Amino acid sequence: MAKLYFYYSAMNAGKSTVLLQSAHNYKERGMTPLLFTAAIDDREAIGKIASRIGIDADAQTFKPDTDLLEEIRLLANKSRLDCILIDEAQFLTEAQVYALSEVVDKLKIPVLAFGIRTDFKGQLFEGSKALLAWSDKLIELKTVCHCGSKATMVIRIDGEGNPLREGEQVEIGGNSRYISVCRKHFKEAVVD
């Protein structure tokens, strides 16, 4: 039975690595996964899912106005699709998450979405909020704070490594812009 899965974490927990491994596993068994990533994420290249450990794959891109149900339906009519894998799922809209639930319920194709739960202010991203509400299965991928505790939050930093408290919710960046920390260190850096 097809399900909607949400794999969530702070940054640097290996979300893209797990996604790419899942795609490999499907292909190895003669199955066809369809990969999507946010068009806004251009760190490697637009339409590329890349892991920090050096593996990558090409992917379809989505923007806020992409009709994922229709796009997946068209592709599924042309060839067999066994799984949909979504990277940077925090950038999905609520309507797109609903559309992915329709892919599961009507097209009977499992969807695995991978994303960050909260932004640098501790607020849920729209896509993550909808996925937390609509997913059949929630899977937390864990990473570690500098103190050794589980990191659940993300701090945005400036060029000198100072935590930022203000700014737009979305700013694409990697280790030079974000640090994953535990709640205690998040509060010390951003809240207090």
Image (cartoon, helix red, strand yellow):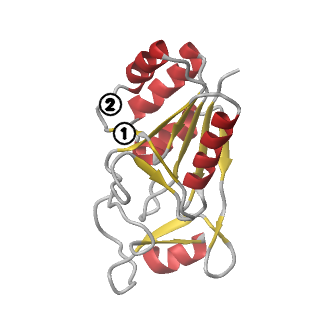
Where the N terminus falls, by quadrant?
top right
Which one is nearer the viewer's eye here, 108 or 134? 108
The residue tagged 2 is 66
Q: Is residue 79 above or below residue 85?
A: above
Q: Position of residue 41 (x, y in %)?
A: 35, 53
Residue at point 53%, 64% (across, down): 52
Q: Is residue 1 above or below residue 124?
A: above
Which three-letter amino acid code belongs to the residue tagged 1? Thr
Q: Is residue 31 left or right of residue 48?
A: right
| Earlier residue among tags 2 and 1 | 1
Which one is nearer the viewer's eye here, 43 or 120? 43
Q: Position of residue 103 (x, y in %)?
A: 52, 21
The residue tagged 1 is 61
Residue at point 57%, 64% (across, down): 53
Please rate how many residues cluster around mark 2, counting C-alpha atoms within 10 Å: few if below 14, some from 14 to 19, many from 20: some
Q: Position of residue 124 (x, y in %)?
A: 46, 51
Residue 107 numbered mark, or none: none
Confirm or deny contact between disc 2 and disc 1 (CB under 8 A): yes
Which three-letter amino acid code belongs to the residue tagged 2? Thr
Residue at point 67%, 46% (across, down): 139
Q: Is residue 72 left or right of residue 4?
A: left
Residue 112 found in image quarter: top right
Residue at point 61%, 25% (across, down): 82
Q: Does residue 192 appear in the picture of this structure?
A: no
Which one is nearer the viewer's eye here, 82 or 122? 82
Q: Position of residue 39 (x, y in %)?
A: 33, 45
**C-alpha separation, residue under disc 2 versus residue under disc 1:** 9 Å
Secondary structure type for disc 2: loop
Q: Does residue 53 appear in the picture of this structure?
A: yes
Q: How many marks?
A: 2
Secondary structure type for disc 1: strand
